[in-house]
Every structure is written in C-alpha cells, then in structure tokens.
Image (cartoon, rainbow, N blue to C red):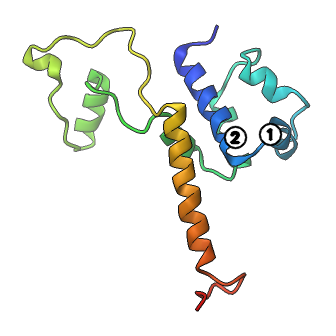
Amino acid sequence: MAKPEVEHMLHILKTTMRLLGVTNRDVERKLGLSSSYLSRLFSGNIELRYGHIVDIAGALGMRPEEILHLAYSELPEPLSESMQKVLRTMGRPVKPSPGSAGAAAPSASATPSGPTEQDVEEMMAKAFRRFFGQLAQYGEGTGEEKK
C-alpha cells in the first residue's frame, strides 16, 4: 500500500481529471502512454513519480504548481524545524511554533493538509463559472467585449 501522501496526490490527480471531464485514455493518448498505464498508476501498481505529476498536469493544460496547490493549499502548522530554517535563511518571517511555547507536540500520524474532494470540486466549479462568465463577455475570437 502506498504512503498516505502518495494516495492523497493520486486522489487529487484523479479528481482533477474527473472535474475537467478528461479520461485516463485521453491523458494516455496525449502523453503517448500505453493503454491502462494510468489505471495501473492510480491503483498503485506503478510507483508515482514527480515526472508523472508534471506530465499529467501538462496533459490537463495545467502547470505542476497548480496541481500541487490543489494538493497542499496551505502549509501545515506548526512548520517543521527544517522549513523554519529555510524560511529564515530566505529572510522570510517565521511564526513561532506552538511547541516552542510549551504547547503539545503535533501528532506523528498527522495526514497531509489539503482540500477535500468536495473542496476541490467547489474550487473547480467556481473557477469554471468565473472563466465561462468572462468568456461570455467577449466576442468570439475578436477579443472585444460584447455590447
């Protein structure tokens, strides 16, 4: 069985494809993959690699960082010591972690933060409404607003 983080990313990829009305076969054709490749990837028979995320995002007309944003829209609290060090090194502000003020330590079994399937569906629906609403304001191919 795959790690929870991998399962989460696979779920985000499948949900995004479904919301965009794109099938496994559509993506396989665009990427020149064999039939059933994505089924095997999504079922865990093929190990998910970052290259898969990049390629699938591209086949969906998205950038990899957009897929990652869907999967991890916010940084977890408290930040790891390593992340705090990176932010400080970059000159970015770091909120003090609750653990440093005597708060309880975070659970080691915490699952990755990110939107639920319903959250993703709502975000995508909102984006589609915004996109198609803006599209309706413009003439076909002219780039001029309809009067």
Residue reaching furthest bottom?
147
What residue is rendered at 62% in x and 31% in y? 50
Q: Please give left or right for residue 2 compared with residue 55 in the image.
A: left
The residue that mark 2 highlights is 17
State the SS at label 2. helix
Compared across the picture, whether 36 is left or right of 44 comes to: right
> In which quarter of the view is residue 132 placed?
bottom right
Would residue 65 be seen by someone viewing this image from the given angle? no
- Amino acid on which disc 1 is placed: Thr
* Disc on the earlier residue, 1 or 2: 2
Name the mark on residue 23: 1
Judge whether residue 107 can be spotted in this image: yes
User: Vertical placement of 115 versus 19: above or below?
Assistant: above
Residue at the image position 90 percent from the left and 31 percent from the top = 34
Please report the residue visible at 58 percent of the width from the left and 92 percent of the height from the top: 147
Residue 95 image-quadrant placement: top left
- Pointer 1 and pointer 2: residues touching (CB < 8 Å)? yes
